[in-house]
Amino acid sequence: MWTGRWPSEAECAEFGWMLGPGLPDFNRLLTTATWDPVAYRWARPTAEGDTR
């Protein structure tokens, strides 16, 4: 079902990975994030010791 947003756009906005207003950085998402098949969404990588 179309939600009005491109797939993975929400994760780009959540992670702050935008090239400009309304322009998600999908390349960074695909090369940096990890797909979580259980949650069915992209997961931001965490640095060792990062408690966010």
Image (cartoon, rainbow, N blue to C red):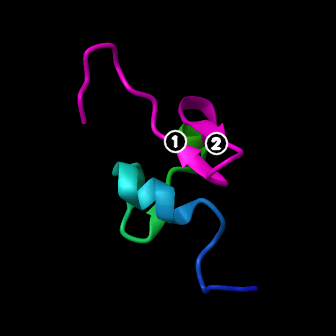
Left or right placement of residue 34 versus residue 52 in this view? right
Q: Is residue 50 magenta?
A: yes
Left or right placement of residue 41 versus residue 47 in this view? right
Residue 36: percent from left, percent from top:
64, 42
The range drawn in magenta is 30-52
The answer to whether 28 is drawn above or below residue 49 in the figure is below
The answer to whether 51 is drawn above or below residue 25 in the figure is above
Residue 6: percent from left, percent from top:
64, 71
Left or right placement of residue 16 versus residue 42 in this view? left
Image quarter hosting the C terminus: top left
In the image, farthest residue toward the top:
48
- Tell me which corner region of the image, top left, top right, bottom left or bottom right, holds residue 44: top left
| Element assignment for label 2 | strand
Residue that appears at 76% across and 85% down: 1
Residue that appears at 47% across and 54% down: 12
The amino acid type, in three-letter code, at marker 2 is Asp
Residue that appears at 49% across and 56% down: 11
| Element assignment for label 1 | strand
Q: Which mark is residue 36?
A: 2
Q: Nearer the viewer, residue 1 or 51?
A: 51
Among the two numbered marks 2 and 1 on one chain, the one whose residue lies closer to the N terminus: 2
Q: Which residue is mark 1?
A: 43
Q: Nearer the viewer, residue 3 or 22?
A: 3
Residue 27: percent from left, percent from top:
60, 42
Q: Determine the CA span between mark 2 and mark 1.
A: 6 Å
In the image, farthest residue toward the front:
38
Q: Which mark is residue 18?
A: none
The amino acid type, in three-letter code, at marker 1 is Ala
